Amino acid sequence: LFATPDQAEAAKASMEGFIFNGNTLRVKPSQTKNRLFFGGLSTTESGAAFEEALKPYAVGLETVDFVTDPDGKPKGFAFATFFNHAAAQATKKTMEEQNATIDGRVPSIEFSRSTGQGGDSESKSVYLGGLSEQTTEQEIRNIFEGFGEIERIALPINMNLSSTRKFGFVHYMQPESAQKAVRAHESGLRMQDGSDVSVELARKPKEQRKRGRQDGYMNDMRGRYGGGGGRPRYGGGYGGGGGYGGAGEET
């Protein structure tokens, strides 16, 4: 564990290609899940105002990425990076428990998983976070089919009936297609209904977990997205571990 990202990057560069016991080391940054996505923000608010509104709830806040279009107009969403996962989790929990508002709105808050830069470069899948219930598979296909041949699109049923937000995956035939899609939408994506969606590479799961989910997913979407289990579940939501989409993994 390094004190700063620069130190971690320097260590990675120095160890890349290092020979240990006759084996060549491959060094990759770990996925710390320390970045949050904030959607549903006002398109009239400034980045400085967003950061000031966030600070009273934030724990270990490091950077804020307030997304704007080329003309400088806010796109209605932002990202915030925290010292570690625990700090990001504490911030998310506090804001949700207090029903915190930013410029008079209650933002949708999700962990920003597997960014295009930090995700698995071999992944063929793109994670879409913050979709609304109105988003259709055809709308997603129209947006993403220009980046390469799509194998399938997964829009899991939202098991939390109190929530109107959901997530999905676009599975490509080639990893290059997924990378192009993420790069094209690295600042996010606004859908027809006005919802703001984060677009990121999904991580590949461990092989055994992948095998545990494959039959349930491929068997006509019958509800067994998890790793076996006696009832349909999604592992407690995206990133909840075990089950569909656990920790931002591709299925």
Image: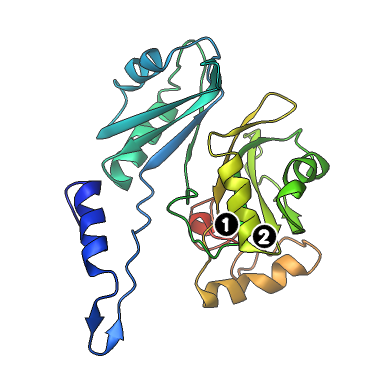
Q: Residue furthest left?
A: 3
Q: Quadrant of the N terminus?
A: bottom left
The percent position of residue 154, horizontal first and vertical second, equals 72, 54
- Closer to us: 70 or 142: 70
Above/below status of 81 relative to 16? above
Q: Nearer the viewer, mark 2 or mark 1?
A: 1
- Mark 1 crowd level (few <14, some 14–19, many ≥20, 10 Å Cα): many
The picture places residue 168, in percent across and down from the top left corner, at 66, 48
Residue lying at 41% horizontally and 17% vertically, measured from the top left: 47
Quadrant of residue 134 within the rendered picture? top right
Residue where numbered disc 2 is placed: 232
Q: Which residue occupies 31% across, 32% down?
A: 63
Callout 2 crowding tier (Cα within 10 Å): few <14, some 14–19, many ≥20? some
Please name the amino acid that badge 1 sits on: Gly
Q: Secondary structure at mark 2?
A: loop
Q: Left or right: where does residue 191 sit relative to residue 74?
A: right
For the residue pair 94 and 217, the one nearer the viewer reads as 217
142 left or right of 177? Answer: right
Q: How much space separates mark 2 and mark 1, taking CA atoms?
A: 14 Å
Residue 205 drawn above or below residue 247: below
- Is residue 93 toward the left or the right of residue 128 in the image? left
> Which is nearer the N-term, disc 2 or disc 1?
2
| Residue placed most toward the observer, 93 or 60 | 60
* Residue 38 in the figure: left or right of residue 61: right
Asked whether the viewer can see residue 228, the reply is no
Res 79 → quadrant: top left
Measured from the top left, where is residue 35 in percent x and y?
39, 41
For residue 245, the mark is 1
On residue 135, the disc is none
Please name the residue shown 69% across and 59% down the image: 172
